[in-house]
Image (spheres, helix red, strand yellow):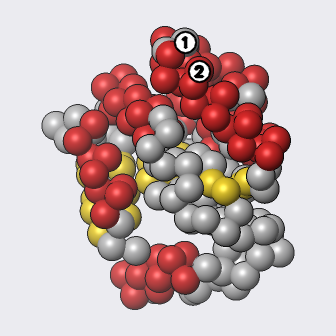
Amino acid sequence: MKDFLPPDWKKKLNDELEKPYFKELLSFVEKEYEEKECFPDRENIFKAFELSPFEKTKVVIIGQDPYHGRGQAHGLCFSVQPHASVPPSLRNIYREIHEDIGKPVPDGGNLKHWAEQGVLMLNATLTVRAGQAGSHSRKGWEKFTDAVIKILSHEKKNLVFLLWGGPAQKKGKSIDASKNLVLTSGH
């Protein structure tokens, strides 16, 4: 499964990928995907990293966990597949953007174009069981995504971290705010 992680990120996260907790996490996720319906599709678990190479990442948006309905999650936080309806959390984000800068509210909820512009769309937990929000929480993903945030925060400067919602804001402790901008809000 970690073969889906792009080489640039794999190199940055190599030490983390070898830790016992991560190996246990991968075993758990493999078993879940074999026995249950889970999201996103296996090949999209690390899609955020694929679309936002380390060197091109300028903004990090942190969500909670993937959408747990069929046909929604595709590996980017707050984003849904092109045919899916816009979820309430993303509708709220669109409304805030419209109120702040007057940008029209889009019809669709696919944010792939944000990721391709250097926005790492990272959920705190990268997988979820169908219909069960939070079902893969506290299995190791949070530790992994904390490591991602620490590496970005310490190796880069002038990143913008958008922490939307309580769980995302808890991840702020891993960010070096002396050289990066941290913005928090509900969603």
Tell me if residue 105 can be seen.
yes
In front of the other: 159 or 24: 24
Q: Are marks 2 and 1 in contact (CB under 8 Å)?
A: yes
Q: Residue at x 32, y 39 (%)?
A: 158
Depicted 110 relative to depicted 147: above or below: below
Depicted 15 relative to depicted 155: above or below: above
Task: Say which mark, if any, is on residue 23.
Answer: 2
The residues bearing labels 2 and 1 have C-alpha atoms spaced at a distance of 7 Å
In x, y percent, where is residue 10?
Answer: 61, 20
Task: Say which mark, if any, is on residue 18.
Answer: 1
Amino acid type assigned to the residue bearing label 2 in the image = Lys
Q: Secondary structure at mark 1?
A: loop
Q: Residue at x 36, y 49 (%)?
A: 160
Q: Is 9 situated left or right of 98 in this image?
A: right
Depicted 28 relative to depicted 70: above or below: above
Q: Hey, which residue is sitting farthest front in the picture?
A: 35
